[in-house]
């Protein structure tokens, strides 16, 4: 009997200790950083616990939901989408979202993660169905922005903020890939032909421009040459005229000096005899002037002519 009483007492003690431990465990609650706990009291929402140490009423308060306030990355499964030109493509992506209202995230929807991924897939199918295949690769940024805009509006009642959406990969059927490769190859060949023709065209233009510049330079050089030659000849004529004028002036001045006229007469006689001798040597027939017997008279006549010229020059104003 005593053994039975002892065993019952021990069992009661163990139960009491277990109850106390459980009560303490339910009373003290530690919330990690960047987390939020939703507390329900007797089945109804009571409060939201932030990071830190908190005391609860055992068996009355309970932690109903635990949320992280960090940004979450959700892998959106691959799905089939039909483009505007009826091409089936497989698209997958990554969705980034963050809980900003733990209460709404707990009571606004059952599973905000599943709802966000499903809505992202639906929205992406709708957007891709409005554009052609070529534009799906060119407008990834616009697709991402439209998905984020649609999700953010829908997720506001859920207490969730959609940060961004990124299309990870777009997979096309093999036949379409082969057709695109052939199209790209043809485009590259076309660009090569155009580039080659542009190079040949530019080469011809450069050659013609070079020939044009060469002709212009040659003509300019010839022009400068003719100008220089003309200026040289003009300068030569000018210098000869000036030298002749100076010589004549000096001769005239010498004639006016005493004995100048006699020297001129002697010079004329010498040149007369010399030139007459040259005429005699150059021909077989010789015609003698009547005045040859009197060279002095001829020289005197020339001297008289010079005097007449001098008097005419002196009479000029």
Image (spheres, grey):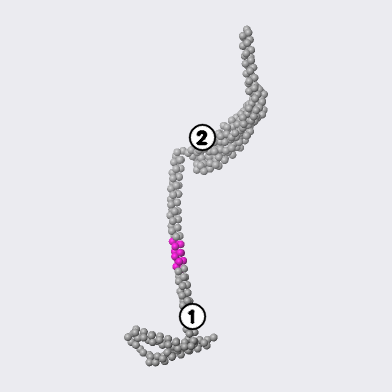
Tell me the tag on residue 246.
1
| Closest to the observer, 147 or 283 | 283
Residue pictured at 52% horizontal, 87% vertical: 314
**SS class, disc 2:** strand
What is the spatial separation of the Cα atoms under label 1 and label 2, in whole angstroms?
112 Å
Provide the residue designation for mark 2.
78
> Residue furthest toward the top?
1
How far from the left and from the top, in percent, is residue 249? 49, 82
Residue 129, image x, y percentages: 53, 39
Say if 177 sits above or below 60 in the image. below
Q: Position of residue 179 (x, y in %)?
A: 44, 42
Range shown magenta: 211-223
**Residue 306 makes an appearance in the image:** no
In this rendered view, identify the residue nearer to me: 121 or 168: 168
Q: Is residue 108 above or below residue 20?
A: below
**Left or right of 182, for residue 104:** right
């Amino acid at each position: 009997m005593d053994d039975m009483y002892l065993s019952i007492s021990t069992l009661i003690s163990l139960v009491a200790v277990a109850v106390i431990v459980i009560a303490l465990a339910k009373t003290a609650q530690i919330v990690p950083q960047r987390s939020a706990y939703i507390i329900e009291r007797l089945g109804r929402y009571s409060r939201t616990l932030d990071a830190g140490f908190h005391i609860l009423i055992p068996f009355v308060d309970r932690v109903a939901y635990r949320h992280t306030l960090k940004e979450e990355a959700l892998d959106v499964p691959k799905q089939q989408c039909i483009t505007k030109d009826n091409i089936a493509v497989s698209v997958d992506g990554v969705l980034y979202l963050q809980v900003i209202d733990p209460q709404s995230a707990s009571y606004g929807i059952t599973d905000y993660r599943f709802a966000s991924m499903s809505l992202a897939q639906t929205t992406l199918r709708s957007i891709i169905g409005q554009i052609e295949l070529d534009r799906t690769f060119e407008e990834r940024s616009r697709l991402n922005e439209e998905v984020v805009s649609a999700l953010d509006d829908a997720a506001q009642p859920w207490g969730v903020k959609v940060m961004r959406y990124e299309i990870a990969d777009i997979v096309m059927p093999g036949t379409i890939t082969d057709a695109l490769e052939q199209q790209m190859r043809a485009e590259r060949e076309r660009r090569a032909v155009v580039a080659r023709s542009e190079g040949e065209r530019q080469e011809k233009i450069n050659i013609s421009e070079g020939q044009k510049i060469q002709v212009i330079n040659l003509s300019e050089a010839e022009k400068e040459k003719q100008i220089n030659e003309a200026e040289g000849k003009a300068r030569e004529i000018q210098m000869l005229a000036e030298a002749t004028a100076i010589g004549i002036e000096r001769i005239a001045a010498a004639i006016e000096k005493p004995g100048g006229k006699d020297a001129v007469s002697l010079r004329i006689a010498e040149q007369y005899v010399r030139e007459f001798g040259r005429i005699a040597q150059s021909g077989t027939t010789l015609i003698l002037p009547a005045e040859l017997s009197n060279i002095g008279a001829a020289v005197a006549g020339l001297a008289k002519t010079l005097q007449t010229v001098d008097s005419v020059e002196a009479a000029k104003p």
